[in-house]
Image (cartoon, coloured by chain):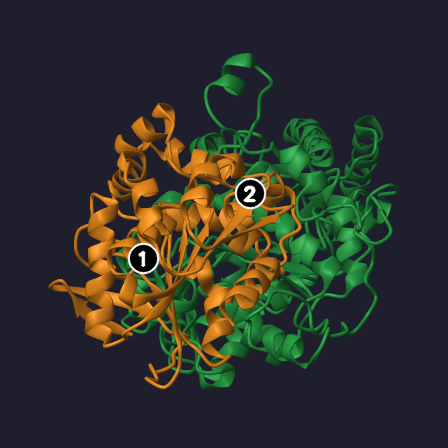
Chain colours: A orange, B green
Amino acid sequence: MKLIVQSHETFIYTAGRDIDSNLPSVLFVHGAANEHSVWALQSRYFAYHGWNALAVDLPGHGASKGTPRAAIGGMADWIAALLDELKVERVAIVGHSMGSLAALETAARYPQKISKLVMIGAALPMVVSDTLLNAAIGNKHVAFDMVNIWGHTGAAQIGSNPLPGVWMAGDFLRLLEKSKRDVLGNDLKACNDYQDGIVAAAKVTCPALLLLGKQDLMTPPKMTKELTAALKDCRVVVLERAGHIPMAEEPDATLDALRNFLI
Amino acid sequence: MIQFHESTHAENIVSGPSYFGFDTLSLHAGAQPDATTGARATPIYQSTSFVFKDSDHAASLFNMERAGHVYSRISNPTVAVLEERMAALEGGAAAIGTASGQAAMHLAIATLMGAGSHIVASRALYGGSHNLLAYTLPRFGIETTFVNPRDLDAWRAAIRPNTRLLFGETLGNPGLDVLNIPKISNIAHEANVPLLVDATFTTPYLMRPFDLGADLIFHSATKFLCGHGTVVGGVLIDGGKFDWLESEKFPTLSENYVGFHGMTFAEESPTLAFFLRARREGIRDFGACMAPMTAFQILQGIETLSLRMEKHVSNTRAIVEFLAANAAVESVSYPELPSHPDHELAKALLPKGCGAVFSFNIKGNRASGKRFIETLKIFSHLANVGDAKSLVIHPASTTHFRMDETALKSAGITEGTVRLSVGLENVSDLVDDLSRALKASQRA
């Protein structure tokens, strides 16, 4: 569905279903230079199992117009504005990578709007290497390759993908290549600049789940110790065979962890 | 573009992240040791269907909420390994195994368009592809305009408001017209339509059409991919680049499909929209799926694709050189020869070689050609290409039999044209065989 948020047309994937005010809602927030389709399997499941599934395209990403927000705080404020436009009072929020920081900040700033928080492929601080950051800011294609290769375990290239017929490394690279110029650099800089994570985590009042890939090279599980300590009610699930993108690498295990936590 | 790890030079290794190289992907892409048995080779999952864990799991698989297999017409674990491997080797996003190359071509067309649509195609095509476009699809309301593949203005001029696809072969059959994919894909994209190529003759080892601008690729995997003349199969590969929503010409992908839970494929995934529709409608409804045993045999072939293609090409180069200097030969059509009209283009697009299938004309008449073919002892006279064994055929009386004289001429075929598919035998034996047969062809 499309609607106007902060003056710009915004796309939200709902699996083609209308929002039902009688159902609970779950909001999926993608990572850097990604868009809603990274949640295709999980969001579709919730949409057909008694939930309003709302997988957003952040401003300037996917089919949403506008300018990408330069800071995590701006993304959180945009998410709050989106919920107001949708007239959805309260959601469970599920964020991946950069989206996990936006979800955390939303839960901290707008606790009344967030019932549960899920952070996937998260770390605090979310440091981005100079090599990657500079390549992304310079709009170098190698930045896509770095995110693609470091973001997945080697199995993304030599399979086999749970989704029959899809070469994970090729599909994800195409998704990154479809992002608009400057978006990856903007997003990675926003992650790198975000210094308020521990303060935000301390403000979160709802239950939280950290869903981590044991083989994640971009946000290694060991980089979540301060985060888990700061969150008042926090569970941690580590997926053995996943890297930074468990939604694709271990889609069923990711879904099952979400179901166990949210339902 | 996916830059493969082609070199072992240290500077390439340390300059940035690299994808696995072509040979590594040929052996491993799509496959892991079997989780249950530890089997290293890809098992042949000879099963029509796959047990659900519970009712919710069943419903979720049917509705694309979970990944997995339901029924082997839609997908099969052995076939999926081949699909993923071919997507990897082509640098694409996803692939679908089909019953044949013809089935792959039909699946591509049927996924993109219906009655009232139009295709612009090269006129230098495999006879089976020409049959489908010229005679069969018009019965279903899809028309094709055939153009000289070398005439870029003709491609552009043939495009109509209802054109939905441009199509050609990477190397045209049988004259080896080199498709100018960079320029023809630009023409297609200016018209907001994709370019589909048949890459059977080149395989991803000799050319990767997605890197040059193509949007969709299909192969007759029967040929060099399998490589041993043992199975019939096809693969259709989605590059994942074309913007189906932006184009506004493909309602099958940009509008919701009642036949699959109201799914709008381009919203479901901007990179996999074509693939998903082909899987969820085309393979499901038309049913031209690949058998798991077939996929296994093609996978065995792909494991040695680069080794075989190198030998196919080196043998072909030696034979082309021999024929070009033989007094009984009127002409040889191979793009590596300076006399070929696409010689310069081939150097740019096909630096590793122009394949192992080519044609030449024997001096004399139809009887000369007959004597030549019947004298050969190592070359097998049959209707196939891309076998490990060397093959020969007379196109005018077989593969291109249904073409009239004008169509034959425009496809570069005469009554004296002979097509060879050069195999992996000792090249000296092949040259001796050809030499004997050429002498016989010239006897009065």
In the image, residue A201 above or below residue B115: above
> What quarter of the picture does the N terminus of chain A occupy?
bottom left
Chain of the residue displaying label 2: A
Q: Residue furthest front?
A: A232
Q: Are marks 2 and 1 in contact (CB under 8 Å)?
A: no
Horizontal side, residue B433 vs residue A11: left or right: right
Horizontally, residue A134 falls left or right of residue B17, namely left
Q: Is residue A23 visible?
A: yes
Dividing the picture into quadrants, the one containing residue B10 is top right
Which chain does the residue under circle 1 lie in?
A
The residue closer to the viewer here, B437 or B70, is B70
**Callout 2 secondary element:** loop
Residue A110 in the image: state x and y as whole percent: 25, 60
Nearer to me, B110 or B428: B110
What numbered label is drawn on residue A107?
A: 1
Name the residue located 46 percent from the left edge and 24 percent from the top edge: B16
Q: In the rendered structure, which disc, 2 or 1, sits on the residue that comes first in sequence?
A: 1
Residue flagged by tag 2: what amino acid is it? Gly
Tell me the amino acid under the disc marked 1.
Ala
Which of B121 and A103 lies nearest the eye of the viewer?
Answer: A103
Residue B139 visible (yes or no): no
Callout 1: 10 Å neighbours few (<14), some, many (20+)?
many
Q: Nearer the viewer, residue B241 or B421?
A: B241
In this figure, which residue is indicated by the disc labeled 2? Answer: A243
x, y percentage for residue B183? 34, 45
Find the distance from the CA under tag 2 to the CA under tag 1. 25 Å
- Element at badge 1? helix
- Furthest residue to the top? B10
B54 versus B227 height, above or below = below
